[in-house]
Amino acid sequence: MLVITAGAMLHFQRLNEVIRETKEKEITVNDCLGQRYIGAGIGDKIITVNGTPGNALGAYLNGAQIFVNGNAQDATGDTMNAGKIVISGNGGDALGFAMRGGRIYTGGDAGYRVGIHMKAYQDNKPVVVIGGKVGSFLGEYQAGGIIIVLGLTENEKDVAGNFCGTGMHGGQIYLRTDKLPNLLPKQVKAEKLYGVSDPEIKDVIADYCRLYSLSEKEILDHTFYKLTPDTDNPYKQMYTNN
């Protein structure tokens, strides 16, 4: 196993060169202080990050696994193809941007535009699970995949911010909450669920609970709102006559 100490002096470009060039399959990055693009394009390694990674963690990830012990910042999981990213702390803005497969889990909250442009194709279905709460524009332009927000953190904010699902035309969003977020777009359909029965969603939550040592029953036995798009193309009349 290769162990890299990042600290304040190791430039992100050099860090990523070392990760790409090493023949070691398991890599640990300690004392991470905002280095960007960690794991970008990696397909055959397991990377553990201790500290606070910067933007675009796991961009174009293609089969690798990245475990993050700390906080993650903007664009985590950018166009991720496969693998799993596990964040003990909080995720930042644009987490899961354009994901096409794999999973991202956070133990804490996340920022704005989580899951923007998520896509799915055949068996490649991306999944994002946020243990806490998220900012506005959750699932913006979502075209596929699953987003689950559990609202487990202790704060007074709503489980999701404003404009949840803006431009959404595929996929599903599950919010563990007793009330819908503000300013829900008209093209988003909300279904109130008293507990979760969908086997696929239950399997994802069970996986999440194993990682974070949580009670699966306590999480599942709660009110959820399932959000899905109410139209295949919410913008079709803005650009052309159909």
Image: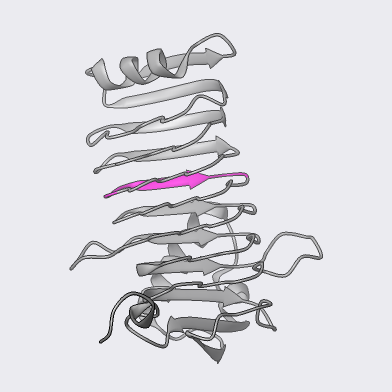
Q: Which portion, as a residue range, is magenta?
A: 81-89
Residue 95 higher or lower than 11, as above or below:
below
- Please tell me in which quadrant of the rendered image residue 236 appears: bottom left
Q: Is residue 45 left or right of residue 53?
A: left
Quadrant the N terminus occupies: top left
Q: Position of residue 165 (x, y in %)?
A: 51, 73
Vertical relation: 14 (above or below) 167: above
The stretch drawn in magenta includes residue 35:
no
User: Where is residue 37 shown, x and y percent of the image?
Assistant: 41, 31
Residue at image location 62% in from the left, 46% down from the top: 90
Q: In the current view of this chain or complex, which residue is farthest to the left?
A: 122
Extreme-top residue of the structure:
9
Foreground pick, 30 / 159: 159
Query: Which residue: 71% across, 59% down?
Result: 153
Image side of residue 223 versus residue 153, left or right: left
Residue 5 in percent (x, y) is at 50, 14
